[in-house]
Amino acid sequence: MNLKSGQIQQLAEYSQFKNLKEFNNHIEMWLVEHKQEFTKGELVGLKRLVRFSAKIPGVCNAKIGTLLKAIHEEYHDHGISRSTFKRMIQKAIKLGIMTVHETERKNGSQSSNLYIFNRFPQNEPPKQQEMNHHNKTSNLSETKKQEIDKRNEEPLNLDHSFTNDRVPKPFIQLVKYFFNEATTIEEYWRMTQIAAYRGNREKEKERVLEIAIDSFKQLISKLKSSKKIQKPIAYFYGILEKKFDELYYAEIYEMWLSQQNG
């Protein structure tokens, strides 16, 4: 889709996010999932593009030259090349992180691109009309159609043994006793990764695992109490955030003590 640059007056209509906070949350989830697939230079370019997409959450119409200039200024003339930036864009498009539209000037020549960040896909059940869908041109008997529809409507619930290899086994072994579905276990671990990333702890794998296990045990204890929890995964994330915050402040306090004793 080519857009006329002179017609792009309301970029807000291309935004998929309610506000900047929601946009940042989705970017964090994208990075937790795919950060390792970008080089260091590509991540610099991606994060700069994210910052340029803050005014209208998730939408940027800046020229590549403008973005590269900002990077060079921030890193004191040690920025990234145009080819690195373009490789980052192609990876992001392939991964589904963003969509890019070309824009044209009134004379038909190409102008700056329109970068639109996409929402991180959530684990949602299929819509009812999709579950009931069948091929109307099929020559199968009505009975056979009903059997197929019935099978399609039955959810495919894979147990813990199908959990992604990226989820640590000790975490799987704990969670499976309470939530045995692979997708649920993966979602709890994804929340752990997001909380660790926001707390700058994503590289401390052993500590992150320890905090995740402690947090999940605390969640189960709360679930077994009389107090009802509407959204266990959200509650679990809240526990994680609190524990990472406590760890941060504990380290700050230790640094202060060492300075006093020094």
Image (cartoon, grey):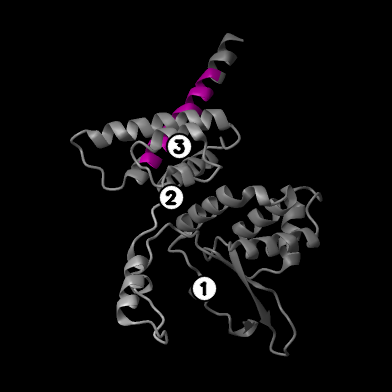
> Mark 1 to mark 3: distance in Å?
39 Å
Q: Position of residue 174 (x, y in %)?
A: 40, 33
Residue 83 is at least partly visible in this image: yes
Q: Determine crowd level at label 1: few under 14, some 14-19, many 20+ residues with C-alpha closer than 10 A.
A: some
Q: Give whichever of discs 1 and 3 has the lower sequence position.
A: 1
The residue segment tinted magenta is 236-254
Residue 45, compared with residue 111, is above or below; it is above
- Identify the residue under disc 3: 172
Tag 1 secondary structure: helix
Structural distance between the alpha carbons of marks 2 and 3: 11 Å
In the image, what residue occupies the spot 28% across and 31% down? 221
Label 2: state its secondary structure: helix
Q: Helix, strand or loop at disc 3?
A: helix
| Alpha carbon distance from label 1 to label 2 | 31 Å
Main secondary structure of the magenta stretch: helix
First in residue order: circle 2 vs circle 3: 3
Q: Nearer the viewer, mark 1 or mark 2?
A: 2
Residue type, mark 2 in image = Thr
> First in sequence: mark 1 or mark 2?
1
User: Which percent across, then down, holds residue 85?
Assistant: 74, 60
Is residue 245 visible to the viewer in this orientation of the structure? no
- Please state the horizontal and vertical placement of residue 242, each as a whole percent of the image: 41, 34
Q: Is residue 247 magenta?
A: yes
**Residue that label 2 marks:** 183
Name the quadrant containing residue 116: bottom right
The residue carrying mark 1 is 14
Circle 1: residue type: Tyr
For disc 2, the neighbor class at 10 Å (few under 14, some 14 to 19, many from 20) is some
The amino acid sitting under disc 3 is Ile
View extreme (left): residue: 226
